[in-house]
Image: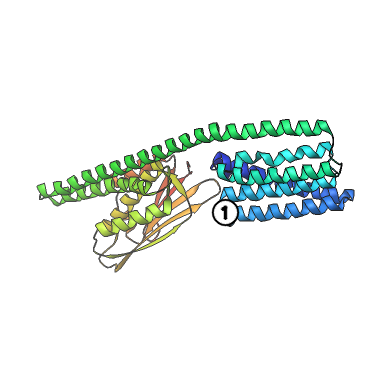
Amino acid sequence: MLKYLKTLEYKELFLVVFLFTFVIGTFVISLVSFFLGDIVSFFVTLFSFIGGIYTVYLYIEKKENINYIAVLLLWMIAFIVFSHIFINNFGIDVVYILLLPMTAPILLSRKALLFHGSIYLFLSILIFSYGFMTGQFTDSRSISGFGLLAFFVFLFGSTYHIAIEESYRKLAEADRQKAFLLKEIHHRVKNNLNIIASILGLEKYESDISEVHKLIKQNKLRIESIAMVHEILYESKDLEHIDFRHYILKLTQHILNTERGLHEIELFTDIVELELNMEYMMQFGIIVNELMTNSIKYAFTKECDTGKISICLEKHQYEYKFIYQDNGMGLKENKKGFGMNLIEMSVEQLDGEVHFFDNDGLVCEVFFRSES
């Protein structure tokens, strides 16, 4: 819950806190009114509590606009205020609660504030007029006190919209420009990496040695796996984190399309929901690239009709467990080389642990904690 609140902009955060405070407050007041025998106040606050629950439902389930939620909240508070003024015969302590809905300048847009604020003030004037006509509202101190407070509240509202809203608009514009620049950076880095990969692809034609071709192709794939991280960030709304499953599926499909082995490959994935930052995701790109290319090239024997590769991500109590497995020859025929060393270096960057062993093929397990 706290993590969710941190993602809200200040106006929506204020609304959420105010809304839940309203629901809890009306619930408590309705219970107190019931036990005190004040049936009228009980039904007023109970009705408001039900309205508050419905408003929470609209906000959470229906994802209604915060301006619409703010308007509902304003008029539920106004209902309680107007009801209690009549219930308490215009007592001076109750009249001041007329100011409570005037917190609306913080929640409503200027247009909504002008419209609903005008209606609220008009209704307040009608209630005051009724109090004067019936002789229930004649205390000059309450009249002048309420007028003075109302003036300062609306002065605050006007200042808020002129100063704070303008500052927020400038801040939002600065964030928008920052997001645009970050996207542009990721786009250009991705393009530059792809250019380097293309140059490597052309370089292999300068040599007739097959081993050189293999090395160039392998390094080209490594660069493309890193470029793919920048590509996903460029296409995503979240410029800091990448969905693990989305990236792995995209990368593995690219590797399968690029590496044409002698066998048909079946890929199985079972990945829990996880988002990682760019640095973590790049390391996993290197790990998956090394493991898959190694399996496709060397793991499967001629007698094997179909190669099977399984990639899983499990969530344990304090860490995550990444599991890669194939049905190839295992470690006996796959000696530790540059690829294995590169995997170990990547796992070190994750502050994790890696284990290789045989189980009807190669199994690689990586234990790590999510930095994000």
Image x and y of residue 94, in percent:
81, 40
> Compared to 25, does 157 lie above or below?
above
Residue beneath the point at 53% across and 42% down = 7
Judge by depth and name the residue closer to the eye, 361 or 237: 237
Residue beneath the point at 43% across and 35% down = 174
> Compared to 6, does 247 lie above or below?
below
**Quarter holding residue 277:** top left
The secondary element bearing badge 1 is classed as loop
- Is 23 left or right of 199, judged from the image as shown? right
Q: Amino acid at mark 1?
A: Glu
Image x and y of residue 211, in percent:
17, 50
One can see residue 247 in this view: yes
The tally of labels here is 1
Image x and y of residue 15, in percent:
62, 44
Judge by depth and name the residue closer to the eye, 334 or 261: 261
- Is 271 left or right of 76, judged from the image as shown? left
For label 1, the crowd category at 10 Å Cα-Cα, with few meaning under 14, some 14 to 19 and many 20 or more, is some
Q: Which residue is mark 1?
A: 64
- Is 271 left or right of 293, judged from the image as shown? right
Residue beneath the point at 65% across and 44% down = 118
> What's the coloring here?
rainbow
Q: In the orientation shown, which residue stands out farthest toward the right?
A: 37
Residue beneath the point at 33% across and 53% down = 251
Image x and y of residue 136, in percent:
86, 41
Judge by depth and name the residue closer to the eye, 233 or 308: 233
One can see residue 23 in this view: no
- Is 346 left or right of 170, judged from the image as shown? left
**Quarter holding residue 230:** top left
